[in-house]
Amino acid sequence: MRRDLLLIILVALLLLCVLLACLALTQSGDGRALRARLRDLGSGNAEADARVVLPSIRVARSRHGHASLRLLRLIRFDPEMPQARSMPWPLVALMALGMAAVVHAMASGRLSQPLTWLATVAAGIMAARFLFGMQLARYSEAVFQQIPDALGLMVRAIRAGLPLAEALRGVAREISSPTREEFARVAGEMAIGRPVEDALVSLSRRTGVTEYAFLAVTLGLQSQTGGSLAETLDNLADLVRKRVAMAKRARALAAEANMQAGLLVILPFLAAGAMAMIQPFYIETFTQNPTGQTMAVVGLVMMAMGLIMIRWLIRQAGRG
């Protein structure tokens, strides 16, 4: 028992060191400074904005090497998007460590030592990946829902006679978060000389919203072929509104599948509770017998994997 406790503490410390070392590289105060600079972007002077935003963009791109970026990408941690994280990263690290400790305690004595360590590390990484990915997906969904409003503001500004750069700054001033911060960043990149198409493509890659890639292609083609920019953006805004409405309808239709997935998870526990009250010796097999305990762990893992697969299929069907 004491040996298992020492192993759990050792694994927890190792995972804590790895996660904290990776995440601390991204949290040296640059995120707060970048958000302050982006907030100042919508209020005024383009030359001052360019002078302020330029160092932060260059530092953000040169701070991480390929190895650290791959490790951060493995747990779906994006150092360029601190605004997407609704939970502080130390809390996520602690929750991942807790999951790793639970898996290690369950696997000790049932699996070999290398497999136990492998399962522990994999559980910690998957827990961190799930938590960071859930926050990023929620942020991307919020940005996606605000696309029609952002395009509508751009169309009205251009029809009023404002240039495209000023229309983007107007979106950064008028629309609510989280699109406000993203367009403020786009306007800041344009202020230092980056083409608007590249800035919007970067926005699409950063948030995972494909519609901003459509906007980048539309603006690029319009700059080459000419024509009415307001009419082009109005047609794109109408298309995007239809896509957003279709996504909402798909989510409503998927509610039944989500309910069925929840029932599939709850029913085995209800059946186990009823069996424990009717014939307790059946449940004792899974609580007192080592073979039964291993079977219970395998069943729980397979149930969790099945639930994750069902949720993934529902999400992919909604996106399609």
Image (tube, helix red, strand yellow):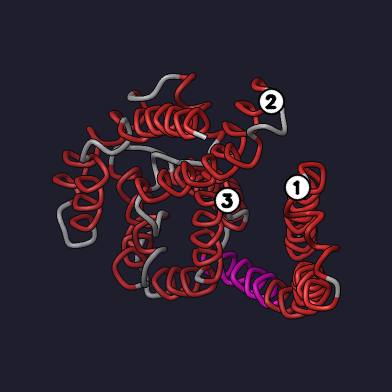
Q: CA distance from mark 2 to mark 1?
A: 17 Å
Q: Secondary structure at mark 1?
A: helix
Question: Is disc 2 in contact with disc 1, using a CB cutoff of under 8 Å?
Answer: no
Instruction: Name which quarter of the figure residue 161 lies in.
Output: bottom left
Residue 85 appears in the picture as rendered: yes
Label 1 neighbour load within 10 Å: few <14, some 14-19, many 20+: some
Question: Residue visible at 39% across and 41% down?
Answer: 80
In the rendered structure, which disc, 3 or 2, sits on the residue that comes first in sequence?
2
Q: Report whether 285 appears left or right of 159.
A: right
2 or 1: tag closer to the N-terminus = 2
Mark closer to the observer (2, 1): 1
3 and 2 marks in contact (CB < 8 Å): no
User: What x and y, as percent, mark residue 241?
Assistant: 63, 75
| Residue 37, x across and y down, in percent | 20, 49
Residue at mark 3: 208
Outermost residue, front direction?
A: 281
The answer to which quarter of the image holds residue 21 is: top left
Q: Which residue is mark 2?
A: 115
Q: Residue at x 63, y 69 (%)?
A: 240
Q: Which amino acid type is shown beneath numbered disc 2?
A: Leu
As shown in the figure, which amino acid type bears the numbered disc 1?
A: Gln
**Residue 104 x %, y %:** 58, 37
What segment is highlighted magenta in the picture? Answer: 230-245
Dot label at residue 293 = 1
Question: For the point 43% across and 76% down, which residue is it?
Answer: 156
Q: Is residue 309 visible?
A: no
- Magenta stretch: dominant secondary structure: helix
Locate residue 186 relative to residue 124 in the image: left or right.
Answer: left
Structural crowding at the residue carrying mark 2, measured as other residues with C-alpha within 10 Å and reported as few (<14), some (14–19) or many (≥20): some
User: Label 1, label 3: how many angstroms apart (C-alpha)?
Assistant: 41 Å
Asked whether residue 240 is drawn in magenta, I would say yes
